[in-house]
Image (cartoon, rainbow, N blue to C red):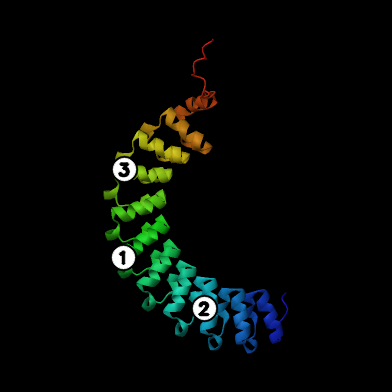
Amino acid sequence: MSKKITTEKDAMAAVQKNGYALEDVPEALKTAEICLAAVQQESYALEYVPEALNTAEICLVAVQQKGRALEYVPEALNTAELCLAAVQQNGLALEYVPEALKTAAICLAAVQEESDALEYVPEALKTKEICLAAVKKGGMALEYVPEALKTAEICLAAVQQTGRAFRYVPEALKTAEFCLTAVQQNGYALKSVPETLKTAELCLTAVLQRGLALQDVPEALKTPELCLAAVQKEDNAFEYVPKKLKAKVEEMLKAPQKSKTADKKPAAKK
């Protein structure tokens, strides 16, 4: 059981050890100094700072350490400058920026720090510039790009950052070349490739990048050679080898590999 806080000295010692201890400090013992010390130790302790003792200084200290502490900033102390500081520390703090303070500059700063902050950008502010900045930071942010802005340029930037973003690319943009780019970056992107574009070459590229992509290779394209390549990349890909091919693949795995010099002709005797 924690020691009961009965003096300001006790309170200061407690919050310096654990900022969350501010919650247990009696209101009568909370001073501006103690509250500041608590927030310096743990930003989220801002939640327990009495409104009468909260200041711009305390709030700034909190959000500069952990941007999402912006959630506990009183409305009266929320400014554009404070919000900018918060999203620069953690882009996801954009979730707690009042709509009236969400500007293009703040939204851009947020997605440049954390791509998924695009989820909290108002639709009216989702411009090409902001969406492109987001997907270049993290391709999976393509999920939050409006369909009207999913251009070849933005989608390609997203997929080049991570092939997993291919799942959010509109079907109309999925060309053979684009699909190849996606699986070269991440073999798992094969799952989102249209069946008509899954060729033997593309599937081989995918499993050479990630063996487990074998699970998304059409059965008709699962040859012993392709399955071998997948299993050599990742052992557990063997689970997706067709039953009729398992024995053959096991045999191929056990076969001794030819050395690089095996096929060379012996040097002529002098």
The residue pinned by badge 2 equals: 60
Q: Which amino acid does label 1 sit on?
A: Thr
Q: Which residue is drawn at 55% across and 72% down?
A: 65
Residue 144: image quadrant is: bottom left
The x and y percentages for residue 190 are: 38, 43
Residue 127, numbered label = 1
The x and y percentages for residue 143 are: 37, 58
> Local crowd at mark 2 within 10 Å, few (<14), some, or many (≥20)?
many
The residue pinned by badge 3 equals: 177
Q: Which of 11 and 270 is in front in this view?
A: 270
Between discs 1 and 2, the one toward the N terminus: 2
On the question of residue 48 being in view, the answer is: yes
Q: What residue type is labelled 2?
A: Leu
Q: What element carries label 3?
A: helix
Quadrant showing the C terminus = top right
> Local crowd at mark 1 within 10 Å, few (<14), some, or many (≥20)?
some
Left or right of 149: which side holds 208? Answer: right
Between discs 2 and 3, the one toward the N terminus: 2
CA distance separating discs 1 and 2: 29 Å
Image label count: 3
Q: Is mark 1 on a helix, strand or loop?
A: loop
Residue 53, numbered label = none
